Structures are given as C-alpha cells and as structure tokens.
Amino acid sequence: MFKFDEIRELIQLVGSSGVSSVEVEHAGSRLRIEGQAPVVVAAPTVVATDPGSSAQSVHPSAAPPAGGAAPAVVDEEAGLHEINSPIVGTFYRAPNPDADPYAKVGDFIERGQTLCIVEAMKLMNEIECDISGTIVKVLPENAQPVEYGESLFLIRPA
C-alpha cells in the first residue's frame, strides 16, 4: 500500500517533469498518475507579401517570405508569474458568498497574502501568494473545479 507522502511526491514529480503519465505497482497496489500535456497555441500572423498586394494570413511555423523576416508575435503574458493550484478541488474567490473577493485584477498583493480558497473534501485550503506584485488575470471562475497544477492567477512581479 502506498503512503500519502509517497503519492504526493509522485504527483509533484509528474507535474514538474512534463511526463504524461506514470504507473507504479508496489506490494499488490497499483497507482496511475496522469500529468497534463503542454498546450501549444499557434496564432496566425499577418504578413504583407509586397507593397502593392493585400495582406495574407501565414501560419507561424511557415517559412518567412523571401527577402524579409516574419514580424515577431508579442506575448502579452511574458514575464508574468503563475500561481497554480496545489490540489484538486473547487476554486472560491471569497471566504463566503456574501464577502468581497480576497483579490481582484489590478490589486497589489504582498507575499503571503491569501488569494483564494480551494475546497477539497470539505476542507477549505487558503492559497497564498508566493511573491509580491499586481494581479493581471484571475483564470478560473468562482466555484469552478480546478486540477492540481492548474493556473489560478497571473501576477506581474513588483
């Protein structure tokens, strides 16, 4: 039988290694942990082929047109810090339905400040910020289920 600490360590290893899944058999028990595959999103880039023609859509993986380079795609989320869910559960932005959210987009938050609650098996787990900065985006909706390692907040470090 697997111990809780062994299971938690395996989950952390799968989450941080990028492995899609691991299956372990030990003392007659079998454990399968599935990680998340990285998501790759490719947006079309607009490139003018010559000054007199209309623009055409080119896939970013396509070769740039002869005689010039394709324009760089600006990543709006570059340099932002992600706060991820440490557990599987239900995401709540406030301590109760009538209360204000712990943190909103645009708020400056300090390291150690509570950002939200993730409820797991009737236990309310306060999720604290690990850096100081400004909240740029709250990703899940209130009362939405979240997975282990799922991004909850995007923060611009101070």
Image (cartoon, rainbow, N blue to C red):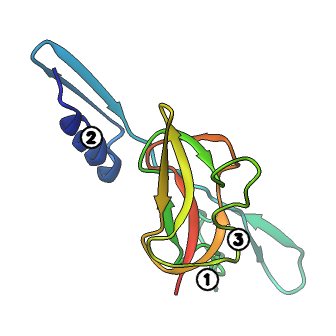
Name the residue located 9 percent from the left edge and 16 percent from the top edge.
27
- What is the x, y in percent for residue 150? 51, 50
Q: Which element carries disc 2, helix, strand or loop?
A: helix
Q: Which residue is mark 1?
A: 69
Q: Earlier in the sequence, mark 1 or mark 3?
A: 1
Q: Residue furthest left?
A: 27
Q: Which mark is residue 8?
A: 2
How many other residues sit within 10 Å of disc 3, few (<14), some (14-19) or many (≥20)?
Answer: few
**Numbered-mark total:** 3
State the CA–CA distance, disc 1 to disc 2: 47 Å
Q: Nearer the viewer, mark 1 or mark 3?
A: 3
- What is the x, y in percent for residue 16? 32, 53
Disc 3 residue type? Answer: Val
Please state which of residues 46 and 126 is positioned toward the viewer in this rendering.
Answer: 126
Residue 137, compared with residue 24, is above or below; it is: below
In what quadrant of the picture does the N terminus appear? top left
Disc 1 residue type? Answer: Ala
How many other residues sit within 10 Å of disc 2, few (<14), some (14-19) or many (≥20)?
Answer: few
Please state which of residues 79 and 137 is positioned toward the viewer in this rendering.
Answer: 137
Name the residue located 22 percent from the left edge and 43 percent from the top edge.
9
Q: Which element carries disc 3, helix, strand or loop?
A: loop
Dividing the picture into quarters, in which one does residue 101 lie?
Answer: bottom right
Q: Earlier in the sequence, mark 2 or mark 3?
A: 2
Name the residue located 29 percent from the left edge and 51 percent from the top edge.
17
How many other residues sit within 10 Å of disc 1, few (<14), some (14-19) or many (≥20)?
Answer: few
Q: Which residue is mark 3?
A: 105
State the CA–CA distance, disc 1 to disc 3: 36 Å
